[in-house]
Image (tube, rainbow, N blue to C red):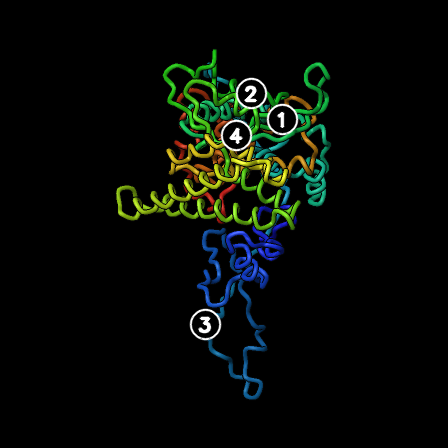
Amino acid sequence: MLFGTSSEKDRAGKRDEGTGGDGGGADRGRRGSRGRRRGQRPGSAGHGRRRHEHLDTEEQLHDLPEDQRRCPRCGRPYGLLGEDVSEQVSWRVKVVRVVHRRRKYARGCRCPVPAVLTAPAPPGLIARGLFTTEFCVNLLIAKYALGLPFSRVIAMLSFQGLEVAPGTLAGVARRLGDLLEPLAAAIEARNAAAGCAHADETSWRVFRVPADNGGSRWWLWVFTAPDTVVYTIAPSRSLKVLEGHYGVSEGKLPEGRCPLILSSDFYSVYQSFSETDGVTPLWCWSHIRRYFIRAGDAQRKNLGAWADAWVMRIGVLYAAHRRLAAAPAGTPGHARADAAFTAALDEIDAHRRIQGARPDLLHPAAAKVLATLDREWDGLAAHRDFPDLPLDNNAAERAVRTPVVGRKNYNGSGSRWAAELAGHAWTILGTARISGHNPRAYLDTYLRACAEAGGKPPAGQALEALLPWNITIPGQPVIHGKDHPP
């Protein structure tokens, strides 16, 4: 993995400049200055060549011509010894015209029955629509899983000989949004009822919206829970988005709902939401760590050693938390890990109090970071009571990556309905992946169910059976690599 200049990965060689502190920075600088080559480490166990038996197989037989299977001297034929077998993987993209021929039968008698019988039409996702269910699945995957604008999808189709207008694809997408809405709503309801969640937001453009309705600058919100993820594009970055998602009324969560533990950054809206009855905030340690890194990078000579020492303390806290999460509860190892985690947190608290006691003696940049640490300490220290939850809000930040790629490629949404479709698609694809499904296979299963229902979204028990956490999809392709929605 490559890290850019704005990465949070510790640039140990850079941090060696002018470090003193507790001595850790210099040691890490010497270790890091040698760098590390990309790729597999020498001597480490490899995974071997991947096998692909799960793919559809096509065999091709290669044989010698008849005249080459004889002895060049006496002419006697060679006997078949066996085969030399090798494999390759082919990637085929093909647009196919499907012609449906429905046979019709004429009555051969005079009985009072229908005079003509016609074979039923195949299930259709969109009434009298040109495109098949498979085409619609690929369209949604291309835009909302791969971040391709419709202009590039149209170019890809033209390479295969199909010319299609942008308005045609937009019309199909709008109809698909109606089909996805009930499924996305069911996922949103489950997400809003979760006991713990992560939240984050980023800017999003929605064009062709009047200025009195917020204009083009909207916000993409993401809420991740243990088995769901929800994306909401709203014209506001205010508290009402959080309250609307979690059903808050008069400063209280819905009656009968379990308490909510919400992990987030320090944005003031989350702080206001933490005052809701039944909500416990957990602030993100990665964010406070960034503040120390930025201060150290901006004032390398004056604050380099100081920032390195703080980054090391937070690193010790993370290491202790990883050991605590890995240790089985009730074991001596868990007790030791818990003690180490508490000690690391107490160490940070002690340095916070000592250094913050005389802010007039500190560099202004250091005083500002310590003031933030002191102001947000209660939410950071609350992790002591929830050691099984992550120390940071990185889950939500990872979840927003795919939409950000889309924002880079197609700038946002062209209308309000397109923004709603984007939120529904990311919600469904992301939740499907969290549930262990191949997102494309899951979307194909759901849309085929819509087609079987006459182009209408399933409801009631039919929808319940299709929810990502309920359904089993046999034979779906396995997703390899790290999980990130969608």
Q: Quadrant of residue 476?
A: top left
Cα separation between marks 2 and 4 = 25 Å
Q: Is residue 456 visible?
A: no
- Rate crowding at label 2 as few (under 14), some (14 to 19) or many (20 or more) other CA atoms within 10 Å: some
Asked whether the residues under the numbered discs 2 and 1 touch, taking CB atoms below 8 Å apart as contact, a structural biologist would say yes
Kind of residue at badge 3: Gly
Which comes sooner in the sequence, label 2 or label 4? 2
Q: Residue at x 62, y 32 (%)?
A: 131
- For label 2, the residue is 241
Q: Which mark is residue 375?
A: 4
Please state which of the two labelled residues, at mark 2 or mark 3, is closer to the viewer.
2
In the image, residue 284 sits, relative to residue 92, either above or below, namely above
- Counting from the top left corner in percent of width and height, residue 11 is at 59, 53
Q: Quadrant of residue 129?
A: top right
- For label 1, the residue is 219
Local secondary structure at mark 3: loop
Local secondary structure at mark 2: helix
Q: Nearer the viewer, residue 162 or 228?
A: 228
Left or right relative to 252: residue 267: right
Which comes sooner in the sequence, label 1 or label 4? 1
Please state which of the two labelled residues, at mark 4 or mark 3, is closer to the viewer.
4
- For label 3, the residue is 82
